[in-house]
Image: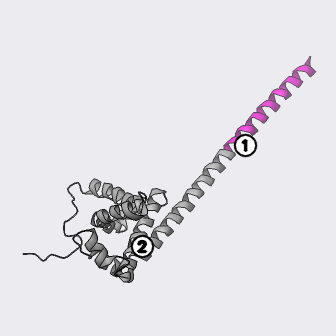
């Protein structure tokens, strides 16, 4: 009888030890998974910051600003006037600058849409300037979509504008894009 009781006690102790071991293993596994996830999140954050830095380097250097100011200063009366002044057939330099400018901002919008960067960070880094790009060129881009490129042409530029406008309006509900965003009008 004592031998049978000893066997039961040993089995119970063994079961408790096994259960304790399984609990510790599960705890260690969960802790390892959490640490791995934390490290992955930090890696993604580091990559996101690097991507933002790269975007800012291309946009906010001297040449980037010079090109932006020039392209945002273009003035036209209608689509035909725009094509005569800045179209590929009449002014390849202006068209090249414009396409580079649009593509750059469309790429930023694509990164935003894909979740590689977020709108708050883009806004905080000074890319609010992009709020003016879509309204200035919307009718031109829509006409180019209709005539040549299709509905998706520069859609991420449009998306960028919408998302950054949401941030701007959350932070400053009274904000309106100035009518003079593309040219200088002296105070009277």
Question: The N terminus appears in which quarter of the rendering?
Answer: top right
Residue sitting nearer the eye, 34 or 77: 77
Magenta stretch in the rendered image: 1-27
The residue to which callout 1 is attached is 25
- Residue 3 placement (x, y as % from top left): 93, 22
Q: Which SS type dominates the magenta stretch?
A: helix
Give the vertical position of 122 relative to 187 (above or below).
above
Q: Is residue 118 magenta?
A: no
Whether residue 38 sits left or right of residue 66 in the image: it is right
Question: The C terminus appears in which quarter of the rendering?
Answer: bottom left
- Residue 21 placement (x, y as % from top left): 75, 39
Q: Which residue is depicted at the point 44% across and 59% down?
A: 112
Local packing at callout 2 (Cα closer than 10 Å; few below 14, some 14-19, many 20+) is: some
Residue sitting nearer the eye, 130 or 95: 95
Task: Assign a secondary structure to mark 2.
Answer: helix
Q: Nearer the viewer, mark 1 or mark 2?
A: 2
Image quadrant assignment for residue 102: bottom left
């Amino acid at each position: 009888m004592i031998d049978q009781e000893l066997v039961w006690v040993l089995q119970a102790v063994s079961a408790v030890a096994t259960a304790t071991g399984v609990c510790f293993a599960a705890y260690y596994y969960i802790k390892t998974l959490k640490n791995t996830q934390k490290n992955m999140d930090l890696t993604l954050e580091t990559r996101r910051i690097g991507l933002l830095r790269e975007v800012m380097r291309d946009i906010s250097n001297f040449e980037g600003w010079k090109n932006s100011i020039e392209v945002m200063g273009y003035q036209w009366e209608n689509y035909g006037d725009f094509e005569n002044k800045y179209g590929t057939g009449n002014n390849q330099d202006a068209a090249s600058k414009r396409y580079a400018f649009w593509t750059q901002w469309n790429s930023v919008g694509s990164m935003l849409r894909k979740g590689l960067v977020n709108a708050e960070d883009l806004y905080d880094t000074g890319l609010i300037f992009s709020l003016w790009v879509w309204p200035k060129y919307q009718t031109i881009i829509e006409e180019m979509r209709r005539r040549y490129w299709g509905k998706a042409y520069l859609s991420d530029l449009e998306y960028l504008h919408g998302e950054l406008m949401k941030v701007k309006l959350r932070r400053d509900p009274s904000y309106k894009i100035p009518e003079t965003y593309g040219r200088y009008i002296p105070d009277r």
